[in-house]
Image: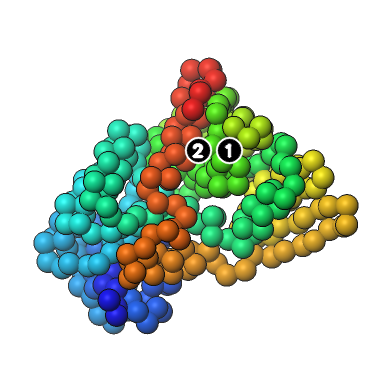
Amino acid sequence: MEKVKAALIGCGGRNGVHYQKLSVMEDVDLIGFCDTDVSRAQAMADKYGSGKVYDNYKSMLDDIKPDVIFIAVPPHQHGEIENAIIDLGIPFQVEKPMALDLKVAEQILARVEEKGLLTNVGFQDRWQNLTETMKSFCEEHTPVVVRGSWLGGIPGVWWWRQQETCGGQIIEQNIHLFDQLRFLFGEPESVYCAGANGIVDDEYGMPGYNLDLDYSSAVMKFKNGVVATLFTGCYNRPGAKVTNGMTVYCKDGTLEYALRSTLDIYTAEGQTHMDRGEEQTGIMDRVFIDAIKSGDGSKIRSPYSDAIKSLKLTMACEESAKTGEVVKL
């Protein structure tokens, strides 16, 4: 196909970034914009200069037939949307987490595989030049232990502050670092997570906040022997200084990765500093569009079948925090 006809379901933050990348690709035509807040969809269509606007995905799917759909909706809304798209045999990219119920994600995966559809899940950090360098370094050296963190505040969107619509910070946000660990080191065999809540109080000004965990620490043992600890927290107030990312301690070197920013490599030869190159979303979207055009998904780094393993890992962390038990994977 000369031009890929694409549509967006959800016209907020993440699909706003996808829009920035897709709208300048000469071989992509954005033909549909859908959001329950139709003004956001209209604003995006107006900016693009064409494309139809919808306030629900069913109307859009009844009216137009895109070659690919980009889905970015609150976590609790996944399931019916994907199944309607699968019914029509349309490939899709979906933002993480792909569902808050593992049975829903597994059912979607089974149907995707039955139909042979191309999919991608938005684990964007796999596409960074920094992550690629880390992976190559770990293949040449011997990684031993890792410590990392995603400690911050509370995003302003309403659904993020509620457990039933967000799934918790580990599943909704820090899943990126959990996925990055899998990309670097392979599959984990067990996880133990401890956490607590109660520190986020009225002074945060977040009415309705009810996340199960305000902060936690997860310890994972990987099948290759690597032991990794990730901190997760949404309690930061002004004055709290944190450098998020991860440090990988190898037998004969160290990687200091600052989240989506820089990488410092330490070996016997000295220190090497790297800055992040091209923003990773554009790289990911370009590869996925090329896969749609060719029908070859071999270069997609996070198809649904792989991404569900990161979802399972973060859900295992939540389970461990609730039960106090080690969860085998």
Picture residue at 55% right of the left edge, 67% below the top: 279
| Residue 117 rendering spot, x and y as whole percentages | 28, 55
Give residue 292's quadrant in the image.
bottom left
Task: From the viewer's perspective, tell me whether residue 62 is left or right of residue 278.
Answer: left
Which of the 4 image quadrants contains residue 276?
A: bottom right
Quadrant including the N terminus:
bottom left
Q: Can residue 279 be seen in this view?
A: yes
Residue 289, placed above or below residue 10: below
> In this view of the protein, which residue sits in the foreground, 51 or 110?
110
Tell me if label 1 and label 2 are in contact, CB under 8 Å: yes
Q: Which residue is disc 1 drawn over? A: 232
11 relative to 141, above or below: below
Name the secondary structure under disc 1. strand
Q: Is residue 181 left or right of residue 170?
A: right
Colour theme: rainbow
Amino acid marked by disc 2 = Ile
Query: Which residue lies at the image location 80% right of the left edge and 47% below the top edge?
Result: 253
Q: Which residue is drawn at 44% across and 66% down?
A: 287
Q: Nearer the viewer, residue 28 or 290?
A: 290
- Residue 161, picture quadrant: top left
Where residue 282 appears, as percent x and y from the top left, is 47, 68
Image point (26%, 38%), residue name: 107
Q: Mark 2 points at which residue?
A: 170
Tell me the distance, in whole angstroms, between the alpha carbons under discs 1 and 2. Answer: 7 Å
What is the three-letter code of the residue carrying label 1?
Thr
Q: SS for tag 2?
A: helix
Q: Position of residue 118 (x, y in %)?
A: 32, 57
Residue 119: x and y, percent? 34, 55
Mark with earlier residue (1, 2):
2
